[in-house]
Amino acid sequence: MYEFAVTPAVTQLRRPGVIITDVAPESLAEELELRPNDRIVRVNGRPIRDYLDFRFQTAGETDLTFRVKKVTGETWDIEFERDEGEDFGLMFEQIVPRQCANECLFCFCKGNPEDARPSLFVRDEDIRLSFLYGNYTTLSSITEDEMKRIIEQRLSPQYVSVHATDLKTRAYLLGVDESRADISDKLERLLAADIELHAQVVLCPEINDGKILEKTLRDLAAFYPKVVSTAVVPVALTRYNTDERLTRVTPEFCRRTIREVETLQKEFRKTLGVTFAFLGDEIYLKAGADIPSKRHYGNYPQIEDGVGMVRSFLTAFGGLLSLPPAVAGGLTRRSGSINRRTHFAAMVPNNAKKADLQPPVTAGSSDFGTFLTGEMFAPVLSAQIDKYNAMTGSRHTVLAVPNTYFGGDVSVAGLLSGSDFLAMKGKVAGDFVVIPRITIKSDEPIFIDGMSYDELKMQFPVPLFDLDTDGLVELLKREN
Ligand code: SF4
């Protein structure tokens, strides 16, 4: 999920239009004398609400008129022509997320420590962000305007948290009445308009599991291929989720769920030709079960929801282990991971600049480093690193980092905090330390608890690096 910064704009009155944040030198926009903080309010007479509207209204147009509220207070109407496909050279403010009107039993906001960074309390429910970044919405409070916008602007695919097709259960989980929970008409309308949907079920033991889950998956599969896939991910309860209606996910529950869903998956593969309903990696890891094959995941439609990440890692690492043994290689420029769910039109701030500025790694000449990861993934990583060590004579080590920030049964790598890593300082060994890149905020080098990446680095006696799977494989790849 893409996490947005909380800015004063979230709470302030929104003016119509989209604000320019940057103008590229020598661009068409500069020629038009557009400046940062100017607001484009109309394109060819049509109102603009955000940069998505701007892209939609300008796409394919060569004769254009912009109405611009200049930062000086003047209003300009600018008529101009551009070459086909010519870029404007404009950057815009981010979309301010629309907030949900639900009271989900398991809402992640209720599981945050009170002092968590403000952006973790943003309850976004925004069809634009669903299209651009793959964020899930429940569609329970979607307006007619938003419905029309999805269809008119082809904001497809949409990612929908269904949780249960049994209405009573869905209403109970979302904390809303049944009329609001009922999205059957909306789904049908979107599907009839050829909008593709990816569905999600947050699985809560004793609420939407068993027969309810079976009905949900069958109901959704009936709409395949317009409903492209469904992810079933276990509810994760931190120590702050104290709602007695929620039951923690146990290994036995995971094993039962795998048995039940496997039967359906086999059926779907026979009738639909695809697995369609995917269980989150956590369910297999917690159950101590084998991770399904690459074939099972097809093109990994829900990988960013933690579905198939482990298989994808094992495949990438398997490629590394099949290389001929040689001297351990250095950390080369990372290839970067593919963000499969993020649309090309999305503006994604990232902290890659920070990563690029890292010094050429001395790790290249070292066969002894420590890899820190979450308790859930540590045994998987450790088994692969052991194979790598046996093959190369390296002495790398993997340490499982307990999540003390959220506590409860949170053990995924992505929710580790700076203070969790810091607590491991006395245990790391070797010449360098690697942490999962996913633990750093996408647009700012800070951890979930607000600790800065630099602060953590300063506390470690050896260089510290943040890597994704590609980066890790690059680090370990030997030079021939
Ligand atoms: S939809 Fe539910 S889980 Fe999502 S932010 Fe709203 S209350 Fe929380």
Image (cartoon, rainbow, N blue to C red):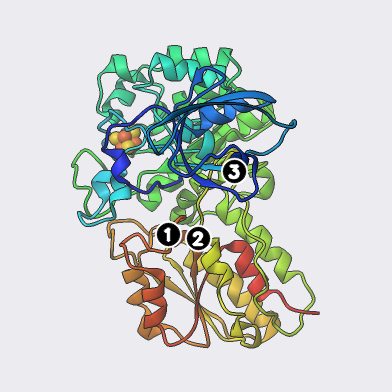
458, above or below 46, in the image? below
Quadrant of the image where one finds ligand 1: top left
Q: Residue at 49% across / 82% down in the picture?
A: 463
Q: Which residue is mark 1?
A: 444
* Classed neighbour count for the residue bearing mark 2: other residues with Cα under 10 Å, few (<14), some (14–19), many (≥20): some
Q: Are marks 1 and 2 in contact (CB under 8 Å)?
A: yes
User: Which residue type does callout 3 highlight?
Assistant: Glu
Instruction: Give the structural element (helix, strand or loop) at label 3.
Output: helix
Q: Quadrant of the N terminus?
A: top left
* Classed neighbour count for the residue bearing mark 3: other residues with Cα under 10 Å, few (<14), some (14–19), many (≥20): some
Q: Which residue is mark 2?
A: 351
Instruction: Give the structural element (helix, strand or loop) at label 2.
Output: loop
* Sequence-wise first label, 2 or 3: 3
- The foreground one among 219 and 131 is 131
Q: Quadrant of the C terminus?
A: bottom right
User: Which residue type does callout 1 highlight?
Assistant: Glu
